[in-house]
Amino acid sequence: MEFGPLSEWMNIYWGGAVAATAGCLVFGALPRLRNGPRTRDAVWLGLGLGIHLLTRPYESIFLLLSVVLFFLPALGDPSQRRRLVKAAATVALVVLPAIGLTLLQNREVTGSWTTIPYALSRYQYGVPTTFTFQPNPTPHRELTTQQRLTYEGQAEAHGEDADTPARISSAWEAARSFCASSFWRRFTWLCRPFLWPYGSTGSSGFWSPC
């Protein structure tokens, strides 16, 4: 699996490039703001958060949480806290237009300020599907053949029943068993000539990252 600007996800036309660019702006601004908060870096952070909100509304929740967690240790220092509060005000001003644009789009598309187009599409067409711990959505309008195929494909990938803690635990145990299987150990042993610069082998001879 590839990560970063050279990954396939970032270089396709499914929206990944825009969200990845926003992530680069956010994570590039974080250490700069921690070392010495400047208005320019706060603007870059706000711009990244705003772009990400417009392209990936749901994932922006976790992006914002990661920003908060990054600055959490610095909040214990009164001097740093004052500087970060000033930077946070700048970030909020930059993000505000994106929030307003999102609310306006919601109002124009769904008729509600707080209902996003994703939710209305799911209600009408059953697409995109729900999380695996939620039941499959039910379409509330007649679907064309192509729409029906898309819905059935996503419903099949979702599964008939919602995941429960017991099913998630069972899947986790299956993944652990696979990693401990003889096949996985033989595979990593064969890959050791290519992996040794990036990791080490423990006493069991099993490759592990440094």
Image (cartoon, rainbow, N blue to C red):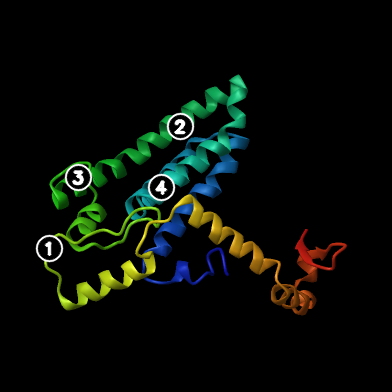
Q: Quadrant of residue 206?
A: bottom right
The residues bearing labels 2 and 1 have C-alpha atoms spaced at a distance of 44 Å
What is the crowding at mark 4: few (fewer than 14 residues within 10 Å), some, or many (at least 20)? some
Q: Amino acid at mark 2?
A: Ala
Which tag, 3 or 1, sits closer to the chain's start? Answer: 3
Judged left or right of residue 127, residue 159 is right
Gap in Å between the C-alphas at discs 1 and 4?
30 Å
Using the numbered discs, state the Cα–Cα distance from disc 4 to disc 2 in whole angstroms: 16 Å
Q: Which mark is residue 141?
A: 1
Q: What residue is rendered at 76% in x and 80% in y?
A: 190
Residue underneath mark 2? 88
Element assignment for label 4: helix
Say whether disc 3 or disc 4 marks the residue closer to the N-terminus. 4
User: Which residue sits furthest front?
Assistant: 166
Under circle 1, the secondary element is loop
Q: Nearer the viewer, mark 2 or mark 1?
A: 1
Name the residue: 55% across, 42% down.
30
Q: Residue furthest right?
A: 203
Between 22 and 64, the residue placed more toward the observer is 64
Crowd around label 3: few <14 · some 14–19 · many ≥20 (10 Å): some
**Label 4 or label 2, whichever comes before in sequence order:** 4
Residue 60 circle label: 4
